[in-house]
Amino acid sequence: MSGGLAELHEKARAVLDPVHYDYYAGGVGDEVVLGENEAAFGRLALLPRVLRGRVTRGLGVELPGGRLAAPVLVAPTAFHRLAHPEGERATARAAAAAGTVLVSGMASTVAIGDVVRAAREVASDAAVWFQLYLQPDEAVTEALVRRAERAGCTALVVTVDSPVFGRHRRDAEHGFHDLPEGLAAENMRDLPGCPPGGVRDIEMSPALSWAHLDRLRGLTSLPLWLKGVLHPADAVLAVEHGAAGVVVSNHGGRQSDLAPAAVEALPAVVDAVAGRVPVLLDGGVRGGGDVAVALALGAAAVGVGRPVLWGLAAAGEAGVARVLDVLRDEFDHALALCGGRDVGDLTRDLVVTRGTGVTARCG
Ligand code: FNR
């Protein structure tokens, strides 16, 4: 992790309740994938090109549902008010100020309408996307979609890697199952099947299918991103079923502990999609160099999860702003050092596997 971000991580560790720190930091099973997401970036290097740069570089990226001032967006993570009293409002303000997208979690401790309002107070054109777990009761899914639309979200991110809950050993050891008194998953309040004011549990179902996605496609005209795609065949299906983009992700090592590192799964998905829709990556991005490697392997942009939580816990809105600023600045520097003029100059031939000096296996 880069210097600036490591410091925020340490500060977050110091201020957070250790149970909540472990909830954020932990992964599934033996946490193999959690470690691999970061380690895999460490195994990749970038071959610089020379004598082709320019003084100011183009970092912006256009995506279905919004523009990013730099190719880093905020991945959806749950329960930001465990990190800071302002919770997702603070995250939304920082993302809007940085000119990037916040993917706001369905398991947010601030209702989506209030999250979007906070972002738009900072930038009237701020783009907030809503992360959705398809619910087995489709009336609940539809109510959530309408909420996101009414709030002004500009895309939906459907997380498809969670047919069942991941088993998180750290949470089990702490007995952490419920939010503290006064905090709730606010988007789940007053949904069909709830008593007035009641909060529904988020359900995971292994019976969800492409047919559910097709019905969702029929419910809304918002761009749909599919998050949690690792197999190239699923990326092809996603395109065929009308996805506006796919997110290569293993949920930050919180679902299957048998999955490959996200960055190792990326090239095959990029190849399978063949430019028809943009591909995002999240998992293990801890510095601007990682952003550059992911873009060189074909990602249009990356998402960051835990680094944002560390910034939020350490210093609220200013902490999240700092994380996004460090990543943008380091990415710009890495791009300059590769002789890049804009993000399109990061190409796969630049990526080599460390210790071999040859174009990465994935290349
Ligand atoms: C997540 N992630 C996640 N993803 C999602 O689609 N819905 C969710 O509710 C959550 N919740 C969540 C909570 C916490 C504490 C973490 C750390 C992560 C996964 C997230 O979107 C993203 O895939 C990973 O966080 C990316 O990995 P890094 O950046 O944390 O390494």
Image (cartoon, helix red, strand yellow):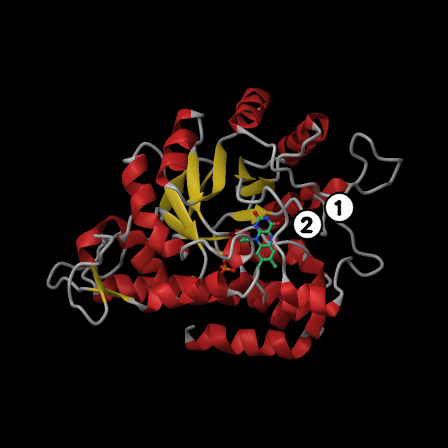
Foreground residue, 164 or 196? 164
Q: Which corner quadrant of the image does residue 146 belong to?
A: top right
Q: Secondary structure at mark 1?
A: helix
Q: Residue at x 84, y 35 (%)?
A: 194
Contact flag, marks 1 and 2 (Cβ < 8 Å): yes
Q: Residue furthest left?
A: 51
Give how far across and how far down residue 181 sits, in percent.
Answer: 85, 59
Pointer 2 residue: 108
Q: Is residue 26 left or right of residue 99?
A: right
Q: Residues within 10 Å of mark 2 (few under 14, many from 20)?
A: many
Q: Residue furthest top?
A: 218
Q: Which corner quadrant of the image does residue 354 belong to?
A: bottom left
Specify the label residue 2 is tagged with.
Answer: none
Q: Secondary structure at mark 2?
A: loop
Q: Is residue 180 left or right of residue 131?
A: right
Q: Residue furthest right?
A: 196
The answer to whether residue 202 is above or below residue 220 is below
Q: From where the camera sits, is residue 129 visible?
A: yes
Q: Residue at x 67, y 34 (%)?
A: 135
Whether label 1 lies within 8 Å of ligand 1 gets the answer no
Give how far across and how far down residue 361 sits, in percent.
Answer: 22, 56
Give how far across and how far down residue 199 sits, in percent.
Answer: 81, 43
Q: Is residue 318 left or right of residue 72?
A: right
Quarter of the picture for ligand 1? Answer: bottom right
Q: Quadrant of the N terminus?
A: bottom left
Residue kind at label 2, given as amino acid type:
Ser
Q: Residue at x 41, y 50 (%)?
A: 281
The answer to whether residue 162 is above or below residue 291 is above
Pointer 1 residue: 186
Gap in Å between the C-alphas at discs 1 and 2?
6 Å
Give how far across and how far down residue 223 sits, in percent.
Answer: 49, 31
